[in-house]
Image: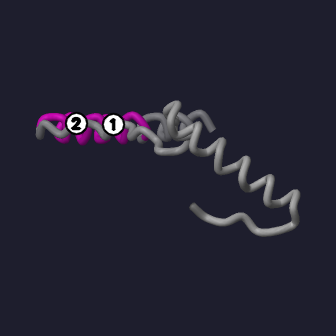
Amino acid sequence: MAKNLDQTLEDLYRELELVNAAIASVEALGCAPPTSRRSNRGRKSMGAEERQEVSERMKRYWAARREGRRPTRS
């Protein structure tokens, strides 16, 4: 069993050398590793004016709901 383990380790070290050589050749080409892209997820920030517009729109919406009718768009 020790012989199989030794052979396996030898194979893995050879494979590691090949991988390191491949990485070095790609780096020599001047290719930069991919950078992480910033996600577009999350909330969009709102300015004070936009918040006020939303507030007024929601007040009209809920007033219309209380009256039992659909709100009108403006």
| Magenta stretch secondary structure, dominant | helix
Range of magenta residues: 12-28
State yes or no: discs 1 and 2 in contact (Cβ < 8 Å): yes
Left or right of 14, for residue 8: right
Tell me the residue that label 1 is attached to: 35
- The type of residue carrying mark 2 is Ala
For the residue pair 15 and 42, the one nearer the viewer reads as 42
Query: Could you say which disc has been placed on residue 61 in the image?
Result: none
Tell me the residue that label 2 is attached to: 32
Name which quarter of the figure residue 71 lies in: bottom right
Left or right of 21, for residue 57: right
Left or right of 11, for residue 6: right
For the residue pair 28 and 11, the one nearer the viewer reads as 28
- The type of residue carrying mark 1 is Thr
Label 2 environment density (alpha carbons within 10 Å; few <14, some 14–19, many ≥20)? few
State the residue lying farthest toward the top: 48
